[in-house]
Image (spheres, rainbow, N blue to C red):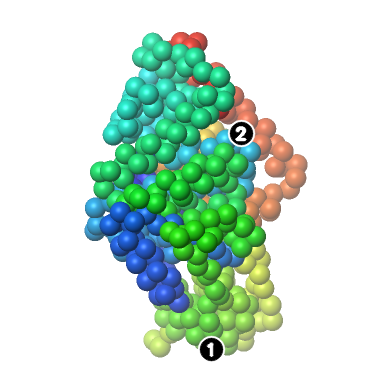
Amino acid sequence: MLEGSAIANRFEALRGLTLSPLIGRDQEIDVLLHRWARAKAGDGQVVLVSGEPGLGKSRLAAALEERLCAEPHTRLRYQCSPYHRDSVLHPFVVQLERAARLAPRDLAETQLEKLEAILAPSPIAETAPLFASLLSIPTGDRYPPLALSAAQQRRLTLAALLDQLEALARQKPVLMLFEDTHWADATSLEVLDLTVERVRALPVMVLITFRPEYEAPWTGLSHVTGTALDRLAPAEVETLAEHVAGRPLPPEVTAQIVAKTDGVPLFVEELTKAVLESDLLVAGPQGWRLDGPLPPFAIPGTLQDSLAARLDRLTPVKEVAQIGAAIGRRFSYPLLRAVAGRDEPALRTALVQLEEAELLFRTGVPPDARYTFKHALVQDTAYETLLRSRRQILHRQIADVFAESSRRQPRLSRNSSPII
């Protein structure tokens, strides 16, 4: 675990872009700030934020981070994925890998050193072997082999995750973000359950987001607050659409955006961008105006239709988005390059176009860059546009790249322990 300044997320990945304003969420922000004030005083708090896809759960978390950026604190972020529901402790594995800035080309010894560097103030000699095993990093002769049963290793690893959180909280307040909990694996949910109990008397605030179908088991606890995000009102939709457009929209276009988006902020943003990219509008001195009558069905009726239309207009760049979607919500440049098999100039140009369309966000610079789809629905839409046969080919190629990487990974010894 590491201080939040080094933990990337899709909002931090924005390069010179401006986030859309947080509209209609003043009450929710006030609740979060109040709970944060209590947490800083040592009265640990847990806030549950539920909402349908696209209502702005992650955007709300980003707004809280923006408000707290000047305050001394440690931020930890854990992101669940629908593609890793059966991967044990996936959110914690990814967070540790990113916090330590592990790179596929790193030697095993280098990966171990990077891991050790982020473990303070925890007892490194006790924690490092457990986390190294979790990340499949061989420890060589630096630590004795873990002579533990699978059950013992599991118990000690979970305890180490909790102890690391508490050790960080003893230094300064901690903001822990656990997103898309409805996709969490069973072991991660167990850690989260233990965390909710552990933070009661710590300067820690845990913000847990999930979709309405997930039934959070912590509702009703004295230090737990629940809030459900509503859809935006029509006036709020108009305000958001105008902000995205950069200037007033024609009334008939605004009316369709209000009618078709049904108050879902993500759909408002994407549909407005789709209209701007469709050449239906011309910039005028007083705002946008229609370049002729508004054709029937010119504005997509669903979020998926809108996203698919935007991807179609980016052909042949669309193929790069499809390959990335087959890899996952987040993917590295080296892995994409290995699977895509394109020359680097063409690949980088395609990625820049996807960034400029705000469908992908980036951290780092190629060849060390990592990319994140703006929203899970963007990834899903790109993936669904693939033919089944093409999906199968891509998944085989991805598996082959991982297998080749494993064969090339240097090993310090044969004493490394298995992943729990």
> How far, Cα to Cα, is label 1 from label 2?
47 Å
Numbered-mark total: 2
User: Foreground: 390 or 409?
Assistant: 409
Q: Residues within 10 Å of mark 1 (few under 14, many from 20)?
A: few
Which numbered tag is attached to residue 266? none
Q: Quadrant of the C terminus?
A: top right
Note whether residue 145 is visible: yes
Where residue 79 sits in the image (x, y, percent)?
A: 50, 48
**Mark 1: which secondary structure?**
helix
**Left or right, residue 64 beside residue 121:** right
Q: Name above or below for residue 245 compared with residue 326.
A: below
Q: Name above or below for residue 265 compared with residue 46.
A: below
Q: Which residue is mark 1?
A: 251
User: Foreground: 355 or 294?
Assistant: 355
Which residue is found at the position 65% from the left and 50% from the top? Answer: 383
**Left or right, residue 390 beside residue 109:** right
Which residue is found at the position 54% from the left and 74% from the top? Answer: 230
Where residue 210 sits in the image (x, y, percent)?
A: 56, 58
Q: Quadrant of the N terminus?
A: top left
- Residue reaching furthest front? 222
Q: Amino acid at mark 2?
A: Ile
